[in-house]
Image (tube, helix red, strand yellow):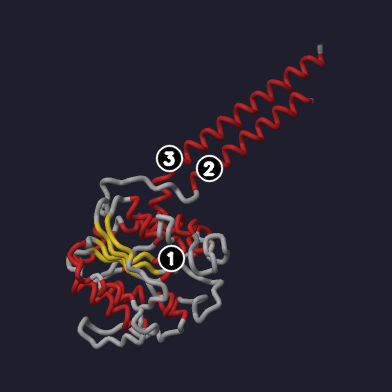
């Protein structure tokens, strides 16, 4: 009996190790240097609000997803994002478009311009506004829609050497300010504006799996105040934004070659998730095989022990 109990404990320990290994494999996979990617050793400008700025990481050497991505890909660049910045002019001069203007003298140096914003517009309950007809209409920057169109227009007119991307922020269902708990009206029109201006975008907001199971936005696990990511939160966000940035060049070229934007051009985090799952599948398969072999081996030992014990009793 003691021998059987010891075997049971050994099997249980082995299974727990397998499960732990599988969990480590499936959560926030470690990013590897990809020297063949389009963003390797390129130069990027990041603009946005405090979530992009990551001021809570000052002095750590990480500085949000911008710093992590530049370090990971040996990129040069600058994070111009500023706390409190808005897309509309609801925050006065503290706008994302003014962050672009601040880097105008360096406009020819950037290979990528990654834009982020909208949270502070929802915080202040700024008017959402509507998308305009054509590309020469007067834009009402008192609205989120007008401000976003103005931002895209300015970027495309001035940063002619760059590829552009827009990050649609993850959801903030537990935030208590303004319309932060439901920003769907802002980001619905944001997607339409991205498609109009042929700006590839990463949709974190409308991806329930990402918000509920990955970023866990209803808790404080990765958001220090239900709004701003903590260092672990940026660690979670970075692989998704990094993998998406690698697709921007090819997606832009695809959009430019088409006469109209279709649903197939919608870059979503779910597509990135599928690619990540496929990439990591081999590692998970190995773990499953190891677990299976361990279970079979343990079962064989137990069966053999029981058989010997039964034989001994008969003798």
Mark whose residue sits in front, 3 or 1: 1
Mark whose residue sits in front, 3 or 2: 2
Q: Is residue 42 left or right of residue 54?
A: left
Q: Quadrant of the C terminus?
A: top right
Residue occupied by mark 1: 55
Residue occupied by mark 3: 282
Q: Which residue is drawn at 21% across and 81% down?
A: 135
Q: Where is residue 262 in the image (x, y as percent from the top left)?
A: 29, 69
Q: Which of marks 1 and 2 is nearer the N terminus?
A: 2
Q: Is residue 38 left or right of residue 7?
A: left
Q: In which quarter of the image is the N terminus?
A: top right
Tally of numbered discs: 3
Residue density around tag 3, few if under 14, some if 14–19, many if 20 or more, within 10 Å: few
Give the CA separation, mark 1 to mark 2.
Answer: 34 Å
Which label was assigned to residue 260? none
Q: Residue at x 23, y 66 (%)?
A: 255
Residue density around tag 1, few if under 14, some if 14–19, many if 20 or more, within 10 Å: some
Question: Viewer-proximal residue, 197 or 147?
Answer: 147
Question: Viewer-proximal residue, 195 or 87?
Answer: 87
Question: Viewer-proximal residue, 53 or 138?
Answer: 53
Question: Viewer-proximal residue, 24 or 303?
Answer: 24
Quadrant of res 82: bottom left
**In the image, is residue 273 above or below residue 36?**
below
Residue occupied by mark 2: 22
Give the CA separation, mark 3 to mark 2.
Answer: 12 Å
Q: Where is residue 88 in the image (x, y as percent from the top left)?
A: 35, 82
Q: Residue at x 31, y 58 (%)?
A: 245
> Residues at badges 3 and 2 in contact (C-beta under 8 Å)?
no
């Amino acid at each position: 009996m003691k021998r059987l109990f010891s075997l049971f404990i050994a099997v249980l320990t082995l299974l727990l190790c397998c499960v732990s290994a599988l969990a480590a494999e499936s959560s926030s996979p470690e990013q590897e240097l990809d020297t063949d990617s389009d963003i390797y050793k390129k130069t990027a400008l990041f603009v946005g609000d405090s979530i992009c700025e990551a001021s809570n990481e000052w002095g750590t050497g990480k500085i949000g997803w911008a710093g992590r991505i530049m370090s990971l890909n040996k990129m040069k660049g600058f994070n111009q994002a500023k706390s409190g910045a808005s897309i509309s002019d609801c925050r006065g001069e503290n706008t994302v478009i003014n962050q672009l203007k601040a880097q105008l003298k360096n406009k020819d140096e950037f290979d990528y311009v990654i834009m982020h914003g909208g949270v502070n517009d929802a915080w202040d309950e700024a008017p959402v506004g509507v998308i305009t007809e054509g590309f020469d209409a007067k834009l009402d920057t008192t609205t989120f829609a007008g401000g976003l169109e103005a931002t895209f227009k300015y970027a495309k007119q001035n940063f002619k050497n760059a590829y552009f991307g827009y990050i649609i922020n993850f959801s903030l269902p537990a935030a208590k300010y303004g319309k932060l708990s439901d920003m769907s009206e802002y980001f619905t029109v944001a997607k339409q504006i991205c498609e109009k201006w042929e700006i590839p975008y990463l949709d974190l907001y409308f991806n329930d799996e990402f918000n509920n199971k990955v970023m866990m936005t209803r808790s404080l696990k990765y958001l220090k105040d239900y709004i701003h990511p903590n260092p672990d939160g940026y660690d979670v966000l970075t692989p998704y934004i990094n993998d998406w940035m690698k697709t921007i060049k090819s997606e832009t070229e695809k959009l430019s070659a088409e006469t109209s934007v279709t649903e197939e051009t919608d870059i979503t985090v779910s597509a990135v998730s599928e690619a990540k799952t496929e990439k990591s599948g081999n590692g998970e398969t190995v773990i499953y095989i190891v677990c299976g072999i361990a279970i079979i081996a343990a079962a064989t030992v137990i069966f053999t022990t029981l058989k010997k014990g039964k034989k001994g009793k008969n003798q």
